[in-house]
Image: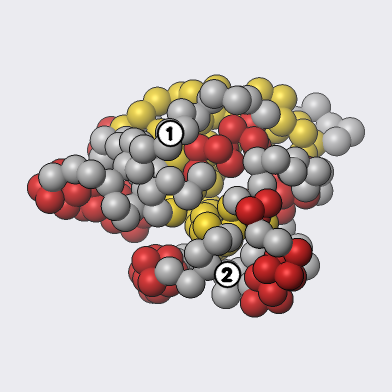
Amino acid sequence: MTYTLSKASFFTSAQNLSQCPPPLLSEIAFLGRSNVGKSTLINLLCKQKNLAKSSQTPGKTQLINFFLTHWKQKDSDEILQIYLVDLPGFGYAKVSKTQKELWNKNLIEFLKKRDSIRLFVHLRDSRHPHLEIDSNLVEFLRPFLRKDQKILQIFTKFDKLNTTQKINLKKEFPNALFSSSLQKNNLQEMSDFILNHTLGIQTNLGETE
């Protein structure tokens, strides 16, 4: 199915699960290490430059940020509402040990207990595809993944690779998607795939590795 974005706006920020909005809509959670490009990808999908605040400073996103999106299906007047959720990056943020432990606690609680999450979008840097921190995230998510939830891996900064590197990465991760802020021609395909998986509609691509 093809959906067209009709509207996207910032909804709210939350520090922990108790501050999150009521789980009345399906949610797509974007997660990955600090500075991998979560905010940039959300902006691309929402066709706005500054909807999600991106930064060159790792760990800048400290809150759980909700963006309300409206999608219209072709030849239909029905509007689909979905939250895109920009989560704090994990990794090398320059904060105190106590603050980092609090972030981790809040993030883990959100990932495990937020029933309205339908899709976990795990962003990985195309230039560093074998980081242990990314492999650990996949292994962390899988044990509590429900039947109505899926994991999708998207490799960001794909334009930074040469042709041979691109071919090899696609062969190694055949079920992943590949994103570049400079090459926007596959955005509709990416949007369709993400939304179809959120709605439980199967496509030719599968789960994570």
Q: Mark 2 or mark 1, which is nearer to you?
A: 1
Quick one: SS at disc 1?
A: loop
Q: Is 100 in front, or is 199?
A: 100
Query: Gap between marks 2 and 1, in whole Å?
Result: 27 Å
The answer to whether any part of residue 122 appears in the image is yes
Q: Identify whether 25 is placed above or below 207.
A: above
Please, what is the three-letter code of the amino acid marked with disc 2? Thr
The answer to the question of whether label 2 and label 1 lie on touching residues, with beta carbons closer than 8 A, is no
The residue at the far right in this view is 75
Residue 109's spot in the image, x, y percent? 27, 53
Question: How many labels were placed on the picture?
Answer: 2
Q: Residue at x 67, y 29 (%)?
A: 47
Q: Earlier in the sequence, mark 2 or mark 1?
A: 1
Q: Residue at x 57, y 69 (%)?
A: 208
Residue 122's spot in the image, x, y percent? 50, 57
Residue 22, image quadrant:
top left
Residue 59's spot in the image, x, y percent? 32, 42
Q: Residue at x 55, y 38 (%)?
A: 40
- Label placed on residue 208: 2
Please, what is the three-letter code of the amino acid marked with disc 1? Ser
Q: Is residue 173 left or right of residue 37?
A: right
Q: Residue at x 63, y 53 (%)?
A: 160
Q: Is residue 21 left or right of residue 152?
A: left
Give the residue at mark 1.
55
Q: Is residue 14 left or right of residue 55?
A: left
